[in-house]
Amino acid sequence: MIEETMNYETAVTQTLNQHMSVRSFLDKAVPDEMLRSILNAARRSPTSSNMQTYSIIVVRDPATRQQLAVLAGNQKHVEECDVFVGFLADINRLGIASEMHGETLAKSLETSLVATVDAALVGMSVQTAAESFGLGAVMIGGMRNQPQQVAELLGFPPGVYMVYGMSLGWPAVETPAELKPRLPESLVIHYEQYDASDPHPRIAEYDAALAEYYGQRNQNAAAWSAPIAKRLNKPSRPRLRQTLEGMGFHFE
Ligand SMILES: Cc1cc2nc3c(=O)[nH]c(=O)nc-3n(C[C@H](O)[C@H](O)[C@H](O)COP(=O)(O)O)c2cc1C
């Protein structure tokens, strides 16, 4: 069937090819049944060893979203979206399953990573499914600014943290608009062997493309390499490991 497709495009690749993060939303509700359809489709995502080490939390309450917006570093779109969805690494349930059989869950880096990856995968599926309905979304990594406070606000048991959240709603901007350029294909996709040939010209090419993109929007953002250099010259969220370990994870 797919072999016969002339242009190798499907509804899914079209949705992926039109992805853009949306940070401003109409005052219009996402129907509950649409949301359930999206979330349940996403639950078909692959999950490491079928362990399903994630949970999803849906937050519609405006007061709670307002507090989450503050915890995420005053990100207004967390407050102003219609629905906020959190993707949680959840090893609490693994602990319960272990206890059901007289065992104790051995916490490890691997288990913590598996839970984090599972949460990331299901969230990506939610984003794609939501966009296929014409909804807009932006992922919110700012939820890791203050993970303990997020956990307390939303009543997480030990062994649960929000890997990232997602503001979801009907876009108040035109979609698809001109999309944010990505790094050159040859820098990112390697065939058979990693191509380590001089990346500098292709990074410079991308810096120029991204600067042009921001320039057209009067957005005062630098291109790609300069902000990375500035941002990553010191560890980001330096206390994150200690905080997550205090919440029942293990990252050593
Ligand atoms: C894990 C993750 C966390 C993110 N966190 C934030 C965030 O806290 N706030 C925000 O405005 N955008 C956030 N983003 C969106 C990215 O900034 C965006 O995807 C990226 O700039 C590419 O732009 P595009 O999605 O419009 O193509 C996040 C994206 C990912 C994948």
Image (cartoon, rainbow, N blue to C red):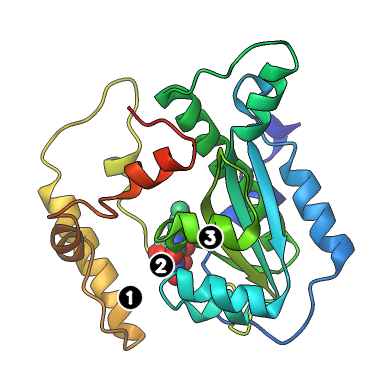
Q: Position of residue 43 (x, y in %)?
A: 74, 40
Using the numbered discs, state the Cα–Cα distance from disc 3 to disc 1 in whole angstroms: 34 Å
Amino acid type of the residue that numbered disc 1 sits on in the rendered structure: Tyr
- What is the residue that sits farthest to the top in this orientation? 102
Residue at image mark 2: 180
Asked if residue 9 shows in the view, the reply is: no
Q: Judge from the rendering whether residue 165 lies leftward or rightward of residue 145; answer left or right.
A: right
Cβ atoms under marks 1 and 2 closer than 8 Å: yes
Amino acid type of the residue that numbered disc 2 sits on in the rendered structure: Lys
Disc 3 versus disc 2: nearer the observer: 3
Q: Position of residue 53 (x, y in %)?
A: 62, 32
- Badge 3 crowding class, 10 Å Cα cut-off, few under 14, some 14 to 19, many 20 or more, is some
Q: Position of residue 31 (x, y in %)?
A: 85, 70
Q: Which quarter shows the N terminus?
A: top right
Using the numbered discs, state the Cα–Cα distance from disc 3 to disc 2 in whole angstroms: 30 Å
Secondary structure at numbered mark 2? loop
Asked if residue 167 shows in the view, the reply is: yes
- Badge 1 crowding class, 10 Å Cα cut-off, few under 14, some 14 to 19, many 20 or more, is some
Q: Judge from the rendering whether residue 215 lies leftward or rightward of residue 121; answer left or right.
A: left
Residue at image mark 3: 150
Secondary structure at numbered mark 3? helix
Task: Work out whether mark 3 precedes mark 1 in sequence or the reverse, and give the earlier one.
Answer: 3
Q: Is mark 2 within 8 Å of ligand 1?
A: yes
Which quadrant of the frame does ligand 1 lie within? Answer: bottom left
Residue 213: assigned label: 1
Using the numbered discs, state the Cα–Cα distance from disc 1 to disc 2 in whole angstroms: 7 Å
Please give the count of numbered marks on the rendered protein.
Answer: 3
Residue positioned 54% across, 44% down in the render = 120
- Badge 2 crowding class, 10 Å Cα cut-off, few under 14, some 14 to 19, many 20 or more, is few
